Image: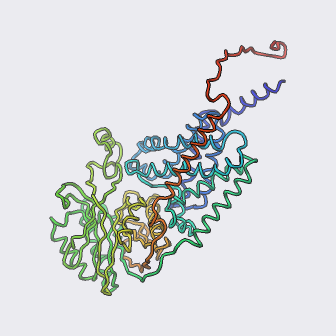
Amino acid sequence: MTGTTVVLRERSRRGRGLVSPWWRGAAAVAAGALSAPAFPAPSLWWLAYVSLVPWMLLVRSAPTPRRAALDGWLGGLGFMVAVHHWLIPSLHVFIVLLAGLLGLLWAPWGWLVRSVLGGPAPSTGRALAAPAVVASGWLVIEVTRSWEGLGGPWGLLGASQWEVSPALRLASVGGVWLVSLVVVAVNTALTLLIAVAAARTAAAVTLVVCGLVAGSAAAWAPRPEPSGHTRIAVVQPGVIGGADSVERRFARGEALTRTLAGQRPALVVWGESSVGMDLERRSDLAERLAALSRTVGAGILVNVDARSTDASGRPGIFKRGVLVGPGGPTGDTYDKMRLVPFGEYVPARAALGWVTSVGKAAGEDRVRGTRQVVMTAPEPGGGRLRFGPLICFETAFPDMSRRLVRSGAQVLVAQSSTSSFQGSWAPEQHASLAALRAAENGRPMVHATLTGVSAVFGPDGRRVGSPVGTERSTATVFDLPLANGTTPYSRLGDWAVYGALAVLAVALAVEGVRSLRRPGASRPAPRVPPARTARASAGRPVR
């Protein structure tokens, strides 16, 4: 038996296994889904550092660049479905279509992984560069899909590290983007360690460098400077359904707020859609809220989800934060700017309006706000608390929190509602985002919801007090540490993203130069007629 025959038989044997397109595709989808348990509710944060390895090993072994791109796409589909599986009751089968479209972002990444990690043993320089290049490619995907119209920055790999102190310190330097870069770089180094014997030294060096980066951030990055405390109350009425749910939810929030009398909070925060009627048209509700403010001795930030007009006269349904004081609405309002695709508006409704008959898509588009604001509430001691409001989905966007802090917000306050996703991972995932926003900017953050999970985090991103779970209906006061100073991320912004783009640009330039220098690269290969083949056997050898 010739060596060629042995090779052909070995390839044939492999082709009946994982190389089979169907089995390989299923493996790619499963490999992409492995990262999901790293996020809340399981919060197996350590899984994020190894979960991409099987996917990378599979893509690396792809026989062609086209197959690597396909493995990247299928893995991206699996990742998106697994991380967002709690949307299935709302979107039904439509989630597979959305995940398939967004998964296309990982097709170039699959090609990149095979290009950088595949083939013969790489040089030392190439092996050292591989983790940075692969991680940069992943980060470009995260930034691209963070556009509101593509679903926003939910499920960023770095967000899985929301309760890991060194990772939170890293976020204060380069935002969640820098955390994602380090996590993917570790995965890439482990892939090299397993699959490429000649690159193991470079892989070990990468792991040491990632550890030093995280350790240096933890040890030397500027820390928030304590500047006192404030007290903020969160009112969570819980799940209230039925035809008269709007009125009963208001009454429940009212009753819970009265229990705060004598506890001297600086601000009371109700959740998103806590008021279902326009306060300008329902002066009776505005007066009831003003009476509550006088009883508690604090301003009340409610959230109105109703048909109204804004300051410029635009009509429509707004998600609006309204600050109410002892004399009624103070005039401080904030209209939600970034809306949830399909949940609060349907992109290209003329073409995609049919989705309202498939899932729970918005029957009418909400009207988006035009600017962020910083509100001011008087404190019991005579001071004034400056806070920056965000509504629901907006806590996923790092730039919005950063802009509020740069505008002078001492506290970030988010009003949210996850009532449609009770019993899923969504409430825990949403609350965890507040830890990252707090750590990135060195400011405490309050995440108040209608139905839980409500939670508060200090300027370092660590939890303050106990979270209010989805099973509770209560009003809770939190003592928040305040801080001064500016974090590197708050000051410099998304420098990690620009760095990743630069790394990719250099890598592509080097690859282009290498391909031009390759012998024969400037002229096409000669056309060779196909070789004749014949079936050989022991009794009839090929001549």
Which residue does the image show at 45% across and 55% down from the upper left?
154
User: Looking at the image, which residue is at 41% across and 78% down?
Assistant: 478
Residue at 42% over, 78% down: 482
Question: Where is residue 69 shown, x and y percent of the image?
Answer: 56, 38
In the rendered image, the quadrant that contains the N terminus is top right
Q: Position of residue 451 (x, y in %)?
A: 37, 65
Q: How is the image coloured?
A: rainbow
Question: Is 325 displayed left or right of 7 in the figure?
Answer: left
Q: Residue at point 29% right, 75% down?
A: 376
**471, 157: nearer the viewer:** 157
Q: Is residue 245 visible?
A: no
**Above/below status of 222 relative to 341:** below
- Res 61 quadrant in image: top right
Residue 292 screen position, x and y as percent: 24, 78
In this picture, residue 481 sits left or right of residue 11: left
Q: Is residue 94 visible?
A: yes
Q: Quadrant of residue 511?
A: top right
Q: Quadrant of the C terminus?
A: top right
Q: Position of residue 357 (x, y in %)?
A: 32, 42
Q: Quadrant of residue 305?
A: bottom left
- The answer to which of 503 and 274 lies nearer the viewer is 503
Q: Is residue 239 above or below residue 34?
A: below
| Residue 277 vs residue 124, the one in the foreground | 124
Q: How many marks?
A: 0
